[in-house]
Amino acid sequence: MKNHLNKLHHVCIVVHDIDKAQAYYESIGFGPWQALPSLSTFTNLDMPDRDGFLALKYRFCDMSNFQLQLCEPNEEPTPQRIFLDTKGEGVFHLGFDVPDADVAENAATNAGMTTFMRGRRDNGTGFNYYDTQEDAGVVLQTRFTNRPET
């Protein structure tokens, strides 16, 4: 798995109020901000609360070497909501780009990591969230978005 986690893509911060958080980050020079495209493009979802996941609000800004994401969950019991309710606002996950989501998932499984949320689009792009909060202090995520057209 080590070779799959060598390209940090983003840091995701869970917040109570995405507008307030974005305004703060803008006031200290972060931006411009954009809404993350709809999560409904993930046709194959395996997660604790599908409807809650699809209702998550995300915004991001591209920095020179990574992307900063803000996530505001609704009241559904998603892992992001549970994190916010039990730990407060803060870094929920680190997202890493990988060459292939399925290969990264297999490598993570072989390294003893457990997937607790997974999503794929029809073209094979997608993500995995690993249950690493207790061991790593943060959730680790792999994402694959650049599948060549076949």
Image (cartoon, grey):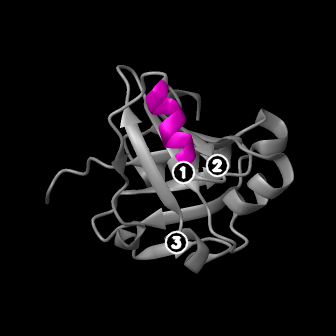
Q: Amino acid at mark 2?
A: Val
Residue 98 placement, left or right of 138? left
Spot occupied by residue 51 in the image (x, y as percentages of width and height): 56, 79
Name the residue located 78 percent from the left edge and 35 percent from the top edge: 137
Residue underneath mark 1: 18
Image quadrant in which you'd find residue 26: top left
The nearer-to-camera label among 2 and 3 is: 2
Over which residues does the magenta segment extend?
20-27
Q: Disc count in the image?
A: 3
Spot occupied by residue 22 in the image (x, y as percentages of width and height): 49, 41
Q: Is residue 4 magenta?
A: no
Point out the image quarter for the N terminus: top right
Label 1, secondary structure: give it: helix
Residue underneath mark 3: 55
Q: Earlier in the sequence, mark 2 or mark 3?
A: 2
Image quadrant in which you'd find residue 85: bottom right
Instruction: Pick out the residue farthest to the bottom.
Output: 51
Residue 121 placement, left or right of 75? left
Q: Amino acid at mark 3?
A: Ala
Whether 29 is drawn above or below 127: the answer is above
Name the residue located 73 percent from the left edge and 71 percent from the top edge: 77
Question: How many neighbours does mark 1 have within 10 angstroms: few (below 14), some (14-19), or many (20 or more)?
Answer: some
Residue 18 placement, left or right of 138? left
Residue underneath mark 2: 15
Whether 148 is drawn above or below 8: the answer is below
